[in-house]
């Protein structure tokens, strides 16, 4: 979870500090995820924030950013330049990958002149909107034409076409990236989304709202039922209030963090149940209401507490971070001795990450 807040003179950026494995039920991989970073470039610099699961190859985005700053330094004159370098890194990585088209969740891409059957026997989608030179084809029983001429389900070399078929790395979720410039010549705060295509593109938009929430606690549907995130509700409410100073804004952000930490376990539980398609659970709530919250729906499920012990314990958490930028000043971390009163570590810890579980009265166990 990433939170951005605008104050009367400056900004507050916050995040949780946990990264979990993307599968469900989850394991905690780290409770000290570096989701907020900052870099001094020239007289100012940039604060960036993104998910702890944002990786290119074997490197987290934080390491990728550090390499970009070391290599390009002062030539990064805007968030758009910064995100363009990240996109280039992703393109470079994708082009090095061998295509794996054995999964029916992957689609093939062919030059248009080889896709003469498109529109007759295949659903190629909106090809012109993606790239007029290429069209989509569904994989057949023999797999995709990953590298022209071999018709293997898994190619033995990178694709010879600029795009080839969509490879495994492009199946990751889109990357949401926040960039807050600071310093005397600071420009607009930008929120960017990098697409998960083989040839990724980045869409940058200025952040106009006072408060912005990114991550796993946005409203959505579970079991076909629209649910409202309490965290998102409170972020929306904060957007309707006048701006206040840095200290007061940091207090508001702390309150939003607290709401998010306690709602996250319910959100993770619902997500797991929805993916399991466990429709047999009895819901003791009127699901026709338009304002059913995540926690109301979760706690209305029969045997909810037992499921939450297994799933919710590894939801967002870890050591939260709050960073302030006051006027043209440098970023400063808000220090705390007790993680703002929020939980730091609970089981299950990912086996490969190591580290003991906390005492039984402080943790949930499998």
Image: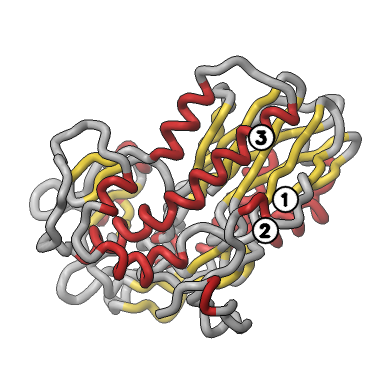
Please indicate, yes or no, whether residue 105 appears anywhere in the rendered image.
Answer: yes
Relative horizontal placement of residue 299, taking residue 122 as reference (left or right): right
Q: Up-down: is 112 above or below 58?
A: above
Relative horizontal placement of residue 12, taking residue 53 as reference (left or right): right
- The answer to whether the residues at label 2 and label 3 have Cβ atoms under 8 Å apart is no
Q: Which residue bears the numbered disc 2? A: 34
Relative horizontal placement of residue 135, taking residue 327 as reference (left or right): left
- The answer to whether the residues at label 1 and label 2 have Cβ atoms under 8 Å apart is yes
Tell me the element at label 3. Answer: helix
Report how far apart the C-alphas of labels 3 and 1 lie in the structure: 21 Å
Report how far apart the C-alphas of labels 2 and 3 lie in the structure: 22 Å
Q: Up-down: is 359 above or below 306?
A: below
Please indicate, yes or no, whether residue 127 appears anywhere in the rendered image.
Answer: no
Relative horizontal placement of residue 280, taking residue 60 as reference (left or right): left
Tell me the element at label 2. Answer: loop
Tell me the element at label 1. Answer: strand
Which percent across, then down, holds residue 365? 44, 78
């Amino acid at each position: 979870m990433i939170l951005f807040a605008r104050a009367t003179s400056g900004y507050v950026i916050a995040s949780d500090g946990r990264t979990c494995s993307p599968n469900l039920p989850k394991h905690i991989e780290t409770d000290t995820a570096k989701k907020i970073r900052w870099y001094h470039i020239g007289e100012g610099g940039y604060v960036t924030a993104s998910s702890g699961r944002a990786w290119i190859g074997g490197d987290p985005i934080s390491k990728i950013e550090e390499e970009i700053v070391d290599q390009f330094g002062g030539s990064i004159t805007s968030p758009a330049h910064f995100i363009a370098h990240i996109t280039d890194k992703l393109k470079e990585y994708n082009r090095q990958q061998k295509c794996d088209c054995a999964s029916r969740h992957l689609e093939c891409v062919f030059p248009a002149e080889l896709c003469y059957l498109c529109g007759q026997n295949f659903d190629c989608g909106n090809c012109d909107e993606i790239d007029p030179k290429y069209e989509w084809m569904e994989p057949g029983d023999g797999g995709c034409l990953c590298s022209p001429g071999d018709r293997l389900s898994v190619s033995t070399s990178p694709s010879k076409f600029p795009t080839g078929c969509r490879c495994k790395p492009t199946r990751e979720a889109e990357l949401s990236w926040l960039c807050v410039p600071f310093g005397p010549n600071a420009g607009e705060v930008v929120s960017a989304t990098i697409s998960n295509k083989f040839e990724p593109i980045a869409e940058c938009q200025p952040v106009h709202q006072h408060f912005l929430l990114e991550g796993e606690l946005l409203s959505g549907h579970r079991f076909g039922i629209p649910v409202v995130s309490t965290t998102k509700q409170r972020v929306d409410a904060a957007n309707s209030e006048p701006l206040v100073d840095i200290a007061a804004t940091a207090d508001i952000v702390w309150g939003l963090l607290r709401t998010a930490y306690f709602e996250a376990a319910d959100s993770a539980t619902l997500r797991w149940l929805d993916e399991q398609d466990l429709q047999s659970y009895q819901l003791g709530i009127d699901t026709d209401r338009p304002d059913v919250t995540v926690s109301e729906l979760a706690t209305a499920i029969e045997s909810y507490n037992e499921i939450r012990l297994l799933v919710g314990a590894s939801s967002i958490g870890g050591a939260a971070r709050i960073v302030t930028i006051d006027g043209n000043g440098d970023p400063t971390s808000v220090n705390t001795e007790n993680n703002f009163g929020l939980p730091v570590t609970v089981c299950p810890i990912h086996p490969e990450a190591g580290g003991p579980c906390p005492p039984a009265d402080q943790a949930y166990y499998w």
